[in-house]
Image (cartoon, grey):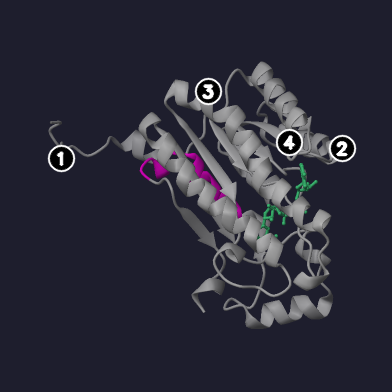
Amino acid sequence: MDTISDKLPDVESVRGLFSLAGKVALVTGSGSGLCRAIAWGMACNGADIAIVDRDGKAAATCAAELRNGTGRHIESFQADVSNESEVANAVSGALETFGHIDVLLNGAGHNIRKPLVEFTQAEFDSLMQVHVRGAFFFCRAIAPGMRERKSGSIINVASIAAFVGIREIAPYSAAKAALLQFSRAFALEMAPFGVRVNAIAPGFIDTPLTRQHSTEKRRKIEEISPTGRFGGADELIGPAIFLASDASSFVTGTSVVVDGAWSAQ
Ligand SMILES: NC(=O)c1ccc[n+]([C@@H]2O[C@H](COP(=O)([O-])OP(=O)(O)OC[C@H]3O[C@@H](n4cnc5c(N)ncnc54)[C@H](O)[C@@H]3O)[C@@H](O)[C@H]2O)c1
């Protein structure tokens, strides 16, 4: 049996707990919104980044922004995360460019808001495909390399809609709940190999996705939010860096809720 040491870690290793220096992160959906902010935050903390988005122009713009702003090695790849061959191309492109991937953040997604009885099968399927199948494709392509190197962090962007009921987004909620449970179960498989799998569950964050709400709806959301406001995309940076870095070395199979106490009500 290992002897337990009471020796405290040295000062430098504690100060560097949140550093991503020398790490490579692949971030899907980072052409816009909260994943763009997360990719920026990771690059600011020392990571090189593969930006992946189905909007190739947005991905390239974000890559240029991050490269110019941080001096890190940043490349963009166009892929629809629900398309198996496009995912395979993006992953092989990222591996050719960077050699390996330490952090995978699955954040690409969209939402469709209306009463459940008005959903078409295609709309329902599109939500499952982007949120669940997309994460599956990227995990299946990237996790074997992490397992071999006995290190890696996978972060799936779920939502508080995975925990609490929110009207008129039942298929989105089901997809996010599936993604959360996918993360937990996959964490068990990867734990013996030193690879961690977690989810981030944001509440209402001000991004192009939530700017689709009418002014009236946004006002109502603010009124019932304990903080009285939407979260900022930049407020996801800290939680994502925590999960990506050694600061969360014993955190796996769980989720970090970032919702300004919305789900505490
Ligand atoms: N904004 C919120 O309040 C909120 C709350 C909880 C969870 N989320 C989740 O966070 C993630 C990012 O949302 P956001 O608010 O930043 O939205 P956003 O619309 O600003 O950004 C989403 C990005 O994903 C890309 N994308 C969409 N479908 C794709 C696909 N099939 N393949 C590749 N790229 C695709 C889009 O092109 C876009 O760049 C989503 O998974 C969303 O469900 C957002």
Q: Tell whether label 4 touches label 3 (CB within 8 Å).
A: no
Q: Earlier in the sequence, mark 2 or mark 4?
A: 4
Which amino acid, by three-letter code, is at mark 1?
Asp
Residue named by callout 4: 52
Q: Quadrant of residue 167?
A: bottom right
Q: x, y (%) of residue 245?
A: 47, 39
Q: Quadrant of residue 86?
A: top right
> What's the residue at 61%, 73% (across, down)?
165
Residue named by callout 1: 6
**What whole-number distance in Å separates the C-alpha atoms at marks 1 and 3?**
33 Å
Residue named by callout 2: 57
| Disc 2 residue crowd, few under 14, some 14–19, many 20+, Cα 10 Å | some
Q: x, y (%) of residue 212?
A: 83, 65
Q: For the N terminus, which image quadrant? A: top left
Q: Work out whether residue 178 or residue 3 is closer to the camera in this orientation and state it.
A: 178
Magenta residues span 236-250
Q: Tell whether label 3 touches label 2 (CB within 8 Å).
A: no
Distance from mark 4 CB to nearest ligand 1 atom below 8 Å: yes
The residue sitting at the right extreme is: 57
Which amino acid, by three-letter code, is at mark 4?
Val
> What's the residue at 65%, 35% (across, down)?
137
